[in-house]
Image (tube, rainbow, N blue to C red):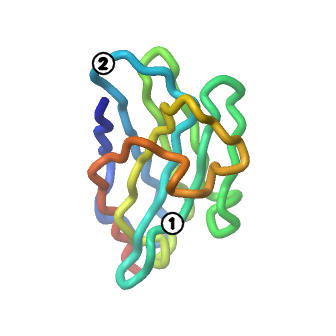
Amino acid sequence: VQLQASGGGLVQTGDSLRLSCAASGGTFKINRMAWFRQGPGKEREFVAAITWASGSTPYADSVKGRFAISRDKAKNTVYLQMNSLRPDDTAVYFCAADIGTRYISSYYAQERAYDIWGQGTLVTVSS
């Protein structure tokens, strides 16, 4: 199973951008997918997640109200709509998928909950 992320780019403060991440290869069942990001000189941090069956969508406080995660179950694809972008949103954005047999709902913000990671897509927000 592999994840292919796309949609990053260079935008200005206040602009919008939509990231996509498609899962493919083999037979798998997605429990949830998520977006994490790593800014310059920072550790990777949780952004948003979506539970595949219920559509539950927890967010990091820093993006709540500006970002929206969604999924297309038929395409095994997750999206991240990013609005009102700010310079501190500049980061490499990674998508991740939990396809394991041991699903713990409360682990949505923890990297250890995810089995597969995409290659990352760079988002740069200029001031």
The amino acid type found where label 1 is placed reads Leu
Q: Are marks 1 and 2 in contact (CB under 8 Å)?
A: no
Rounded to the nearest angstrom, the CA distance separating label 1 from label 2 is 35 Å
Q: Position of residue 92 (x, y in %)?
A: 35, 64
State how many labels appear: 2
Label 2: state its secondary structure.
Answer: loop
Q: Which of the two discs, 1 and 2, sits closer to the camera?
A: 2
**Residue 127 against residue 104 in the figure, above or below:** below
**Residue 43 against residue 45 in the figure, above or below:** below
Check disc 1 and report the residue beneath it: 85
Q: Position of residue 21 (x, y in %)?
A: 38, 38
Check disc 2 and report the residue beneath it: 26
Q: Position of residue 68 (x, y in %)?
A: 60, 47
* Quadrant showing the N terminus: top left
The amino acid type found where label 2 is placed reads Gly
Label 1: state its secondary structure.
Answer: loop
Crowding at mark 1 (Cα within 10 Å: few <14, some 14-19, many 20+) = many
* Quadrant showing the C terminus: bottom left
Using the rendered view, name the quadrant where residue 115 is placed.
top left
| Residue at left offset 27%, top offset 22% | 25
Left-right relation of 9 to 43: left
Lower position in the chain sequence, tag 1 or tag 2: 2
Q: Nearer the viewer, residue 96 or 55?
A: 96
| Residue at left offset 58%, top offset 43% | 69
Taking the view exactly as shown, the residue that stands out farthest to the bottom is: 41
